[in-house]
Amino acid sequence: MKVTILSASLLFAAATFSAGNAMAESLAEQIKKRAGVIGEVKALLNNSDPSIRIAALDTMLKSDDTAMRETAYSMGLNSADDTLRAISLRNKFNELKSIHVAFTLPDGASEKAKAKFAEFGGSLALNIKGYEEKNGRFTFSTSIGGNYTKDGNISGLMLQFASRYCKGNFFFNEESVYTGDITCEKYTFPATFTII
């Protein structure tokens, strides 16, 4: 009886080891296949035909596959092609819940400007309430001034918004940072924010 139990245990261990190896080989094959697909699609993003680049990026950004989408964002937002960057920005806004705009006190600022800067704490949070990718329009409320809903717009690499107390104009630069100015109650400050 001891021999039978030992034999059964050895057979079970061998079967488990064999199944584990088969699963590992199958997983390795799946990974290689997936890497090939991602590589092919990434190559399309570098195609000389702009229509193919745009179609590849749009397809990747609309994918349910997280790896595919993040690869598209990385390549699209850092592309030398402003059209790909703009398409990536429009899509990225679908995922944003808020934007934190940080402003800087300019050299030689007046005492009133310093007081306004201090009042806002050098920043403004835009809480995204809605976004329409088709036209780039978004609605938001701010961290200051109550829960009023206001509008903003993304057009190409530009972003503009106007709230109850502040308005901003920004450009998405080569470092993938929005830079520009924010004016809060007549006082203008250089400002930046990131979305990645």
Image (cartoon, grey):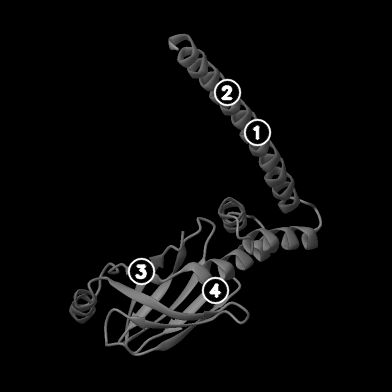
Asked which quadrant contains residue 191, the reply is: bottom left
Circle 1: element type:
helix
Closer to us: 84 or 16: 16
Label 2 crowd (10 A; few <14 / some 14-19 / many >=20): few
Query: Is residue 128 shown above or below 6?
Result: below
Q: Mark 4 points at which residue?
A: 158
Q: Where is residue 52 in the image (x, y as percent from the top left)?
A: 79, 59
Dot 3 amino acid type = His
Q: Name the residue under label 1.
A: 26
Q: Residue at x 69, y 48 (%)?
A: 42
Q: Say which label, 1 or 4, has the lower sequence index.
A: 1
Q: How far apart are marks 1 and 2 (CA)?
A: 16 Å
Q: Mark 2 points at which residue?
A: 15
Q: Nearer the viewer, mark 3 or mark 2?
A: 2
Circle 2: element type:
helix
Q: Mark 3 points at which residue?
A: 100
Asked which quadrant contains residue 32, the reply is: top right
Label 4 crowd (10 A; few <14 / some 14-19 / many >=20): some
Closer to us: 82 or 64: 64
Dot 4 amino acid type = Met
Q: Say which label, 3 or 2, has the lower sequence index.
A: 2
Query: Is residue 47 shown above or below 1?
Result: below
Q: Distance between the residues labelled 1 and 4?
A: 47 Å
Q: Distance between the residues labelled 4 and 3?
A: 16 Å
Q: Say which label, 4 or 2, has the lower sequence index.
A: 2
- If the image is split into quadrants, where does the N terminus sit? top left
Q: Which of marks 1 and 2 is in front?
A: 2
Mark 3 in CB contact with mark 1 (< 8 angstroms): no
Q: Which residue is drawn at 51% across and 58% down?
A: 176
Q: Distance between the residues labelled 3 and 2?
A: 56 Å
